[in-house]
Amino acid sequence: MAIEVRIPTILRSYTGGAKVVDGTGDTLADLLTDLDSRHGGLRGRLITDAGTLHRFVNVYVNDEDVRFLGALDAKLSDGDSVTILPAVAGGAFGFAAAAAISSHSISSQSVAAAVARDAVAAR
């Protein structure tokens, strides 16, 4: 089962710069585990220590927000498209996101620059 996953700029260092990667899994949790096996560290950027999606990360399956599809239990099918997007408010990451990212040796300036690049690319 192939599932296309769109990766935002801020996470492409985990995918060797790839904007899109393929993965497999019956649920979003399975997909993220599969992706992490090939792109180490990616799952940790999306999932909290408590095992839930970070609140500053939005994930969509075929343009539907996974929070309305069962979050990590959201069912996936062959050919689905998953999009990972950092949540933005007021044109910049929230303080929690910036703090979490900066604790992983990425500066808040890098985050802001990446968000700006993604916003321009999306236009």
Image (cartoon, grey):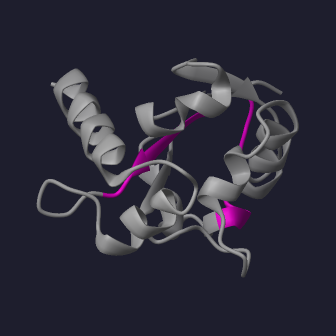
Looking at the rendered image, the quarter that the C terminus falls into is top left
State the image coordinates of residue 87 (x, y, percent, origin top left): 34, 58
Camera-nearest residue between 65 and 10: 10
In-image side of 64 versus 27 (left or right): left
Asked whether residue 77 is drawn in magenta, I would say: yes
Bounds of the magenta span? 72-87
Camera-nearest residue between 11 and 30: 11
Camera-nearest residue between 108 and 41: 108
At horizontal 57% and vertical 21% (from top left) the residue drawn is: 20
Looking at the rendered image, the quarter that the N terminus falls into is top right
In-image side of 10 versus 69 (left or right): left
Asked whether residue 28 is drawn in magenta, I would say: no
State the image coordinates of residue 43 (x, y, percent, origin top left): 71, 51
Camera-nearest residue between 77 and 23: 23
User: Residue 90 appears in which quarter of the rendering?
Assistant: bottom left
Q: Is residue 112 above or below residue 6?
A: below
At horizontal 65% and vertical 26% (from top left) the residue drawn is: 15
Q: Is residue 79 visible?
A: no
User: Residue 37 appears in which quarter of the rendering?
Assistant: top right
At horizontal 29% and vertical 68% (from top left) the residue drawn is: 94
